[in-house]
Amino acid sequence: MRDAIDLLIKVMPELLQGTGVTLQIALVSLALGMIVGLPVGVGRVYGPVWLRHVLGAYITLFQGTPVLIQLFMVYYGLPDIGITLGRLQAAFLTLGLNSAAYQAEYLRSALLSVSEGQMVAARALGMSKWQAIWSIILPQAVRLALPAWSNEAVAMLKYTSVVFLIAVPDLMGQAKILASRYFAPIQIYLIVAVFYVVLVGITYLILTSIERRMRIPGLTGDAAS
Amino acid sequence: MTSPILRIEDVHKSYGALQVLKGVSLTVQPREVVVLVGPSGSGKSTLLRCINLLNPPTKGRIWLEDQEITAPGVNQDRVRQRIGMVFQEFNLFTHLTALGNVMIGLVKVRKMRKNEARDLAMFELERVGLADRAHYYPAQLSGGQKQRVAIARALGMDPHIMLFDEPTSALDPELTGEVLAVMQKLASEGMTMIVVSHEIGFARQVADRIVFMEGGVVVEEGTPQQMFEQPVHERTRAFLRNITR
């Protein structure tokens, strides 16, 4: 027990640093995923047919291949065509584009489940198609997509762990270094697992509170809770 | 003789091989209340959606006031601002309060400032008797209240003509009265209205003219008295007998 506490105290600073890196990667990637995923999702539903196909291909590409291969392609492959990225940049770009594909799909199904009458009523008021999408359809779709989006955020926190394979010192990267430094892989990885659980728990609490705050009074789901 | 507010000339509408409207002509004068009746599938709702260009006609022409709105190059969004529409299923924006539903068109389309829009929206909600429900969300309102909010939302745009597509058909019978009362009040204030409805009491009392459609054409039109008491066509007679029974 004594040893375990000693070990914990010794590795804590580096694990906290790693946690910071993990959080940074997750937040930047989710934000990038949102910035890209929102227009992709809207374009998938409301864009011209050729655009829907192009965006569909992008989504299939990122959903259909392992994220690790995507990361290697970005970090080791892009330099071949003259684009060299730093480790963190490669992590942001890969996980951001990967997340965008998923977020776009969540948004797409949410957009499709907003009733058609909403668009018709908005157009009848004199709104243009894009005005209606922006001020009527999207605010409803975003609420519908929120539970799926929460899952994406939680998944992202754990996905980030692949970046240690391009030597980014995230939580997992630190774990690997510490495990070999102290010859205590089981203990270290257990501690790191607890770190991930705590991060996920906090994220989950924050997101459910956002979901609750954005809920529309009187709609189903309100009554159920 | 004033000039008509709406003139529909030989309007056709098809969806692929399915011909829904087969040459409808209709002229509506300012302040007139026209009630459209007819069996389901006769093209009444389609005609309303042709008028505000939600589903533009495949053939034929429509004038709103002095403008041919079916002419190429017409800004359809601007046309729709002048035409209020009320739907059978209300179609209130579920994420906005009653007040928000009325305000959003004022802010986004009429480009009014927020506080100005709020004042006008409150005024419109008062007009339909729902000022005390301004901060309720659609899911918290009864069907009749929802439909009155939808009417207030349309009125906020200051329409020159209002289209009602079976406004009471989705309501429980005890809730239709409050909606019809609001519509009757609008008519008495001089609003031009085209109403698709099977509410016979409303048609008798409020309509200036009843238009009977069947199979995508206007079969017969006339004052409520003519139509209910001595319709020319046997189809009209049979239909009206059926719905008044």
Image (cartoon, coloured by chain):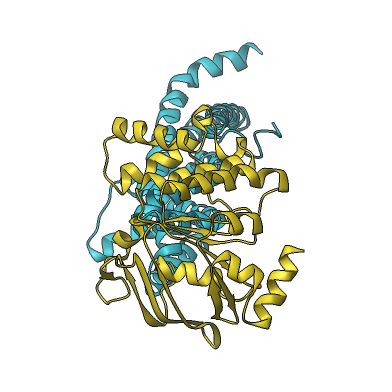
The N terminus of chain B sits in image quarter: bottom left
Q: Residue at x 43, y 20 (%)?
A: A13
Nearer to us in this view, B208 or A98: B208
Q: Residue at x 55, y 26 (%)?
A: A202
Q: Is residue A119 above or below residue B178?
A: below
Nearer to us in this view, A131 or B64: B64
Residue B241 visible in the picture: yes
Give the letter of the cyan chain: A
The C terminus of chain B sits in image quarter: bottom right
Please count the marks in the image: 0
Nearer to us in this view, A168 or B76: B76
Residue B94 visible in the picture: no
Tell me the quarter of the picture where residue B56 sits.
bottom left
Residue A114: x and y in percent read: 54, 53
Q: Is residue B117 left or right of residue A26?
A: left
Residue B169: x and y in percent read: 65, 56
Tell me the quarter of the picture where residue B236 sits.
bottom right
Residue A193: x and y in percent read: 59, 32
Q: Residue furthest bottom?
A: B17
Q: Residue furthest left?
A: A82
Nearer to us in this view, A23 or A174: A23
Residue B111: x and y in percent read: 26, 44
Q: Residue at x 39, y 70 (%)?
A: A54
Q: Is residue A116 left or right of residue A52?
A: right
Q: Residue furthest right?
A: B245
Q: Is residue B87 left or right of residue B53?
A: right
The colour applied to the residues of chain B in this rendering is yellow
Q: Is residue A149 above or below residue A216?
A: below
